Every structure is written in C-alpha cells, then in structure tokens.
Image (cartoon, helix red, strand yellow):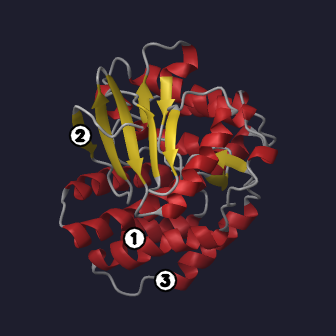
C-alpha cells in the first residue's frame, strides 16, 4: 500500500500494546493496526478474522497485511462508536443490536472453525482472581483476607456449574469495540472490532461483557429481558435458571478481576479515570452479588468490598 497520505491520526487504544492510526489517502480513510510490539496478537487477530469471515457479522475488511512489519491495513468504521452515541432513548436499540450479533455468532460459528482458539480453564480464572487479591484487597486495610478459602470456593463453583467452554468468546464485546454502521441493515449495523483476544468459553460470555459493562454506568433495566431473549434464541441445553446462575457467576468473576485491574492501573499510571471505572465496577459487583447463591463466597465479598 502506498505510504504517502494526506493525514495520519493516532487513535488511542486503552491498555493494548498495539498502535492504531487512521490515514487519509485522497478521499478515503483507512485504519492501520501496528502489532510490532505484540507479534502473538498479530497472529491471533488474523486467525480470529478468518473465523468471523465465515459468520454473518460486520467486521472491518482487511486491505493489506504486512507480515514483516506486523501491520494490518483495514476498513475504517468511522466514529460512531457505541460508547459515544448511546443516550437514554437509543440505549435499548444499541444493546439489542449488539445482542443480536452475539446470537448470530453463537448460532453460526462451529467448533471446527475454532480449533486454534485456547479454551478457558480454572487456571485462567485463578490468574484473573489474583489481581483482585493482589491489588484491590490491600486498599481495604483489613487483615486476614481468606485467600486460600477464596480460591477454593471459586474452584468449587467453577467445576460444579459444568460449564461448556467450547463456544466462541470475543472477550471484550462491549460498547468501546462496537460501531454503528448506518449504511447496513438489521444486525449488520453493528460493526465489531478488537477481537484478537478471542477464546473458547461460556456461550454467554460476550453477553455478560456487554450487559455488565464496567466502563459505562448505563441502566440494567433491560438486562433480564435481553438475557432471556439470548437464551431462547441460542442452542443452550441447560434450563434458564441454570444458565442465569452460570451467567452471574462468571459476571462476578469478571468484575472481580477488574476491581483488581483498575486499582493496579491507578498504581502504575496515576491516571485517575480508572477510579471512575472502579466505582462503576464495584456498583455492578454489588448488584451481581444479589444473584449469587453461595453464601460463603458472598459473605467474603460483602466484608471486603
């Protein structure tokens, strides 16, 4: 691709090692993703791209791949990112649009296409929970956190739920990675990016990532309705109560990791916007705890939150 361009704009990408730029060539704009600092993510991105190409969803078209420099030149979805355009009146519309895409992905993706994705295990969960223990708990200035008991309770919950960790999970399926594409119709109006961290996991993982969003404090008024809508439109074999229990347990696990992650990032970067995320995540964690049946685990959270 011709490197001569009229304009080059760097796009902030949160915590990622990748660099993202928007370039203008004549009257067209394109996105460059530079994975040179994380070559594994470069490979993962291309692998997941091939998976999603076989699914009827909107992902950016790739125009060119520079294997030597680990750069990808791709379609620009514009500026109508969900987290920038949602307001009270259109929140449900955007949530429903996003949920419809999760349904399409779960119904159309097949195990044979997912063979290169890593399956989520309890060891992965334990590593994530450790961020909470290491970075969040010390801020509470309370002694004798029952670390061993905490991990054992989570291990028991993880295995007793009999999760089927064989489904496509984007991992970060939330408003910051979704774009409204007015030129398309139906569910294709939702453009999906940043999928290089995808793995094999719980069928409802992307649903909870969306509805229990830790960065945006939108209402949960629509969550129960959309959870049931997702359940009745996907091939879930468990009954609804079991699915909801699995959903909230993994939602609590994700929120737990993020409580530690936000505190860690404040310590490292001194960027205090993470305290806003921490506040939202804590609020969502408290709401999720109301859905958790395990009294021992719930009592630990209630004491140390």
Mark 1, Cα crowd under 10 Å, few <14 / some 14-19 / many 20+, is few
At 27% from the left and 34% from the top, the residue drawn is: 5
* Residue 191 visible to an observer of this rendering: yes
Q: Quadrant of residue 113?
A: top right
Say if mark 1 contacts mark 3, CB within 8 Å.
no
- Image depth: mark 1 or mark 3 in front: 3
Q: Is residue 207 above or below residue 124?
A: above
Relative image position of residue 212 (x, y in whole percent): 46, 44
Looking at the picture, tell me which residue is in the foreground, 51 or 93: 51
Q: Quadrant of residue 239?
A: top right
Extreme-bottom residue of the structure:
144
Say what secondary structure mark 2 lies in. Answer: strand
Question: Which badge, 1 or 2, is on the more N-terminal residue?
Answer: 2
User: Dot 3: what SS?
Assistant: loop
* Residue position for label 2: 9
- The location of residue 73, given as percent across then percent down, is 44, 40
Identify the mark nearer the N-term, 1 or 3: 3
Query: Which is more foreground, mark 1 or mark 2?
Result: 2
The residue that mark 1 highlights is: 303
Q: Quadrant of the C terminus?
A: bottom left
Callout 1 secondary element: helix
Q: Nearer the viewer, residue 16 or 287?
A: 16
Q: CA distance from mark 1 to mark 3?
A: 11 Å
Residue at the image point whose x is 48% and y is 29% from the top: 191
| Disc 3 packing (10 Å; few <14; some 14–19; many ≥20) | few
Q: Which badge, 3 or 2, is on the more N-terminal residue?
A: 2
Query: Would you say 48 lies left or right of 112 here?
Result: left
Q: Which residue is mark 3?
A: 146
């Amino acid at each position: 691709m011709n490197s001569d361009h009229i304009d080059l704009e760097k796009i902030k990408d949160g915590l990622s090692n990748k660099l993202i730029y928007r370039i203008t060539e004549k009257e067209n704009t394109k996105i460059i993703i530079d994975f040179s600092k994380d070559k594994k993510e470069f490979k993962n991105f291309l692998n997941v791209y091939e998976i999603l190409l076989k699914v009827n969803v909107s992902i950016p078209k790739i125009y060119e791949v520079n294997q030597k420099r680990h750069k990808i030149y791709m379609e620009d979805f514009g500026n109508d990112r969900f987290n920038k355009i949602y307001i009270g009146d259109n929140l449900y519309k955007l949530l429903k649009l996003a949920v419809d895409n999760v349904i399409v992905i779960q119904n159309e993706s097949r195990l044979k296409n997912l063979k290169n994705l890593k399956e989520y295990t309890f060891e992965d969960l334990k590593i994530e929970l450790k961020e909470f223990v290491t970075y969040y708990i010390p801020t509470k200035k309370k002694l004798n956190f029952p670390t061993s008991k905490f991990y054992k309770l989570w291990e028991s919950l993880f295995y007793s739920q009999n999760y089927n960790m064989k489904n496509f999970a984007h991992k970060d399926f939330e408003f910051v990675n979704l774009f409204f594409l007015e030129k398309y119709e139906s569910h294709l109006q939702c453009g999906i990016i940043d999928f290089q961290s995808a793995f094999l996991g719980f069928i409802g993982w992307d649903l909870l990532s969306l509805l229990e969003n830790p960065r945006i404090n939108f209402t949960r008024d629509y969550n129960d309705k959309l959870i049931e809508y997702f359940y009745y439109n996907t091939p879930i074999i468990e009954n609804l109560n079991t699915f909801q229990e699995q959903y909230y347990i993994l939602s609590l696990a994700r929120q737990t990791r993020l409580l530690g992650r936000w505190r860690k990032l404040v310590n490292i970067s001194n960027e205090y916007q993470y305290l806003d995320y921490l506040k939202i995540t804590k609020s969502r964690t408290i709401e999720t705890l109301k859905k958790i049946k395990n009294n021992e685990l719930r009592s630990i959270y209630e004491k140390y939150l």
